[in-house]
Image: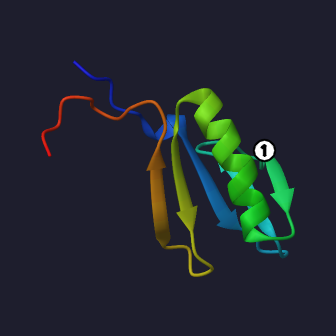
Amino acid sequence: MAKTPSTSNTRFVQPNPQGGWDNKKAGASRAGSHHDTKQGAIDAARQMSQREGSELKIKNLDGKIAQSDSHGHDPRNIPG
């Protein structure tokens, strides 16, 4: 049976209240990295997420999740 990623195995790209964008693992008190641009944070978070085999959730300025990627947890036997 495929293992489902837990919340603690999720990485977020989210706006920082002081400006810029953070790449942060769920449950962490500090960001893994801080970037001036959203794309910079996405690129760094995607590399880390692929290496960790974790979920990646990208938020908009309003805090809502705009995009979600799964790295290493995609089922292989889905028809279609």
Q: Residue at (80%, 71%) from the top-left corner?
A: 37
Coordinates of residue 14 in the picture (x, y in percent): 65, 64
In this view, the residue farthest toward the left is 79
- Going by the image, does 67 lie left or right of 33? left
The residue sitting at the top extreme is: 1
Give neighbour class at mark 1: few <14, some 14-19, many 20+ (Cα, 10 Å). some
Hey, what amino acid is under mark 1? Answer: Gly
- Near-viewer residue (20 or 51): 51
On-image quarter of the N terminus: top left
Residue located at (85% from left, 74% from top): 18
Q: Is residue 73 above or below residue 21?
A: above
Q: In the figure, residue 20 lies in which quadrant?
A: bottom right
Quarter location, residue 15: bottom right
On screen, 56 above or below 34? above
What residue did someone put label 1 on?
Answer: 32
Please tell me which residue lies in front, 10 or 76. 76
Residue 12: percent from the left, percent from the top?
60, 53
* Residue that appears at 34% across and 35% down: 74
Circle 1 SS class: loop
Q: Residue 26 vs residue 78: left or right?
A: right
Q: Please say if 54 is above or below 66.
A: above
Residue extending farthest to the bottom is 62
